[in-house]
Structure formats: C-alpha cells, structure tokens
Amino acid sequence: MTLSPPPVSCGIDRPYAGLRRVGRTNWPAVGHAWRVTSRTRRALADLERKVLPPDIAALDQLRLVQVPFVPEVRLHLAEDAIVWWARMEAEAGAVLEPPFWASAWAGGQAVARYVLDHPQVAAGRRVLDLASGSGLVAIAASKAGAAAVTANDIDPYALAAIALNANANGVTVTSSYGDLLDGSGGDAELVLAGDVFYSRSMAERILAFLERVVARGARVLVGDPGRGHLPTDRLDVVASYQVPMADAFADPDINHIDVLQPRLTF
Ligand SMILES: C[S@@+](CC[C@H](N)C(=O)[O-])C[C@H]1O[C@@H](n2cnc3c(N)ncnc32)[C@H](O)[C@@H]1O
C-alpha cells in the first residue's frame, strides 16, 4: 500500500482540525449536498488535474490504485499523504485540514471487506457511509447491491474524491456534505463508519449518533484497528481480520482490525 493516515504530523489523537471550524451547519438529514456544489466542483476539478498516469513517479500527486485489503475497489490516493498535504497547503497559501480522504484507512478497509464478503448486509438497503473520506466503504456498499448509497463527510475535498472514486469504480453514490452527528441517520437502513473513533471528542459524538441509529431500528457497522478511543464496552465484535501482509498498511502497528456493532441495551 502506498500510504496510511499520516501518523506523525497528523496524530490521530489531535483534535481533528475540521471540528474546530466555525460556521459549519449541522444537517438534519442525509443528502443535502447542494450547499457546497460550487466548492465541491472546484475541488473536483483540482483533484482531476492532479491524478498521475500509472507510469510516472511523483510523491505529490494522486494515483488510482487498488486497495490492498479490498482489491475489488480502486481509489485515487496520495502517493505520500504528508507530501500531498504540504503541496495543497503550499498552493492554497494557508493551513488546510489533513487530507484524510487521500488514504484508505484500515477501519474503512475492514468494513468494506466485510460488506463485500457479506453482501446481504447491504443488498437492497439504503446505506449511509458516515465520515466517508475517500468513499471506499460507500463504493463497497454499492458494489454489494445497496439500493441507494449516501457518502457523508465534512470536507469538501472528500466529497470531490468520493465523486472521482465512485466514477472510477462505475458506481453511483450520493454525496452529503456536513455534520450529521446530531441526528439519527435520516432514513438510512444501514449506517457504516470506517475508522471514526480516532479522538475522544469524535468517539463520544459518534457513539451517541450510532446508538440513536440503532434505537430507531437501523443496523450499524463500524471498523476500527484499535485506535484507542473505541468504546469496547458498548460494541460487539462482528468480524476480525488479521492483516498478514507487511505492506498492507503503511502504519506498522496495525495487524488486526475489528468490525463491530453497537451492543443492544434496550
Ligand atoms: C479517519 S478518516 C476515515 C475515512 C473513511 N471512513 C475510511 O475509513 O477510509 C475520518 C473522516 O471523518 C471525517 N469527519 C470528521 N468529522 C466528521 C463529522 N463530524 N461528520 C462527518 N465526517 C467527519 C473526516 O473528514 C475524514 O474524512
């Protein structure tokens, strides 16, 4: 694999920069992408310019690659996420949020693997991929036969990447911009979330959200490689993956990923 979440300059324990932004709207339901259409369109045009052909080597570009643990899916990922981030900031002349969408996170790879190996979980269902990043999990759900898939994120560049990646995989995914965590997932019958328990504040909000989703009768699956903020007493393991390939994830500490669901306590 060519990259991983940047572990040093973008430590996952650090409060995620996007959450500190002022003026973000809490969207009440799934599917409100219209608000950022022009921002997303600009981001999409920008990303498309930066995709490298396979035979050219450069660290500060995107490349369409097979996902190691989910080879059915190809994503536009940064050759080196840190270098990519630096390039984006240099071009913008400003400090930017980490490009989390430019990596296929381990938790997302596990959820995508699970959904593709158990397509009945998603087939015919309305699916929400929360904090979608690259769109990996949303694309897997679509490939598994979901009736409709919405990919949600708070980063306009993630929405652009999701559009690019859905197109590269020949699937349809509706993107949804904004923070949905105060709601209960709209009418989604299945909510998927890869690698979202990476900070304490995020974990608290996500767990409350996911428990509301379960309380209204929808199913939830999350993927986590042991990031440290997983509320293990509130979740049950559905599947576990050992990751034997040394180069499957550039993060050398990851060798085990769980897929989990909230424990029913009512
Ligand atoms: C670690 S990445 C995981 C991406 C993807 N799920 C995967 O597994 O590859 C976390 C993602 O959460 C998004 N995010 C952070 N806070 C969010 C929020 N409140 N609502 C939606 N997405 C959020 C970030 O923009 C980022 O894309």
Image (cartoon, helix red, strand yellow):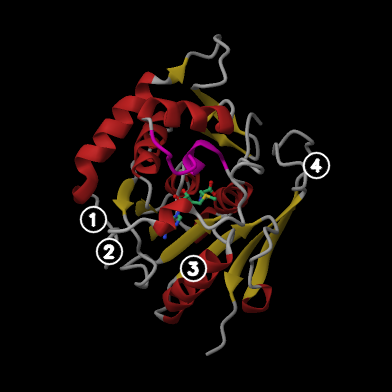
Calculate the distance from the C-alpha at mark 3 to the C-alpha at mark 1: 20 Å
Q: Please state which of the two labelled residues, at mark 1 or mark 2, is closer to the viewer.
A: 2
Q: What residue is disc 2 on?
A: 27
Residue 218 appears in the picture as rendered: yes
Helix, strand or loop for disc 3: helix
Q: Please state which of the two labelled residues, at mark 4 or mark 2, is closer to the viewer.
A: 2
Calculate the distance from the C-alpha at mark 3 to the C-alpha at mark 4: 29 Å
Of label 4 and label 1, which has the lower sequence position? 1
- Given the image, on which type of amino acid does mark 4 rest? Pro
The range drawn in magenta is 94-104
Say left or right for 224 vs 47: right
Q: What residue is disc 3 on?
A: 206
Q: Is residue 1 above or below residue 177?
A: above
Query: Do the residues bearing badges 3 and 1 touch, measured as CB atoms within 8 Å?
Result: no
Tell me residue 64's x, y (percent).
50, 25
Of label 3 and label 2, which has the lower sequence position? 2
| Residue 72 colored in magenta in the image | no
Tell me residue 125's x, y (percent).
39, 60
Q: Residues within 10 Å of mark 3 (few under 14, many from 20)?
A: many
Q: What residue is disc 1 on?
A: 32
Q: What residue is disc 4 on?
A: 244
